[in-house]
Image (cartoon, helix red, strand yellow):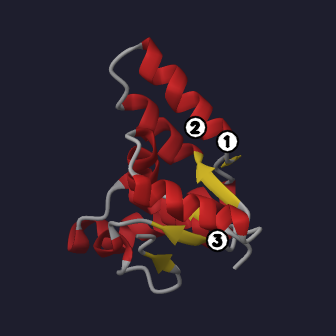
């Protein structure tokens, strides 16, 4: 693995000042491990903002990580995941896209929603705290 991809759950915790999430991110950064956010999680965080101040705060948080945009390869993988797992396991579009970004970028996905992702065998998922 070349780094960590933070799922939306971790970003939400960070934006709410959760000390466990801050400790996790600090420990990863202190270890020199590159840490990223997918554009999907960034958009989900922004969508949850209630006002302009929260949006600005979310933007600063997102900007503190490397932002990974979708590639055709990731989109294709996500489409395949949706075909395979959306009906049988309830995989959401956002989760399929996040998983595909992690896989195609060779990143470990940090999330506390492991159950959403364990159906995807090639994905490396770790509960961060």
45 vs 89: above or below: above
Question: Residue at 39% across / 45% down in the picture?
Answer: 12
The secondary element bearing badge 3 is classed as loop
51 vs 18: above or below: above
Q: Which residue is mark 2?
A: 61
N-terminal label among 1 and 3: 1
Mark 3 Cα shell of 10 Å, populated few (<14), some (14-19), many (≥20): many
State how far apart marks 1 and 2 are (Cα): 5 Å
Question: Residue at 57% across / 29% down in the picture?
Answer: 59
Question: Residue at 38% across / 68% down in the picture?
Answer: 83
Q: Are marks 1 and 3 in contact (CB under 8 Å)?
A: no
State how far apart marks 1 and 3 are (Cα): 18 Å
Q: Are marks 1 and 2 in contact (CB under 8 Å)?
A: yes
Q: Are marks 3 and 2 in contact (CB under 8 Å)?
A: no
As drawn, the residue found furthest toward the right would be 32
Count of numbered tags = 3
Q: Which residue is mark 1?
A: 64
């Amino acid at each position: 693995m070349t780094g960590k991809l933070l799922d939306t759950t971790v970003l939400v915790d960070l934006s709410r000042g959760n000390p466990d999430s801050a400790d996790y991110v600090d420990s990863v950064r202190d270890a020199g491990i590159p840490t990223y956010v997918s554009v999907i999680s960034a958009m989900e965080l922004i969508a949850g903002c209630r006002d302009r101040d929260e949006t600005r705060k979310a933007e600063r948080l997102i900007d503190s990580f490397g932002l990974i945009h979708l590639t055709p390869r990731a989109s294709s993988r996500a489409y395949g995941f949706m075909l395979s797992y959306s009906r049988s396991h309830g995989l959401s579009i956002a989760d399929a896209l996040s998983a595909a970004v992690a896989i195609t970028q060779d990143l470990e996905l940090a999330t506390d929603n492991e159950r959403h992702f364990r159906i995807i065998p090639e994905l490396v998922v770790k509960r961060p705290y």
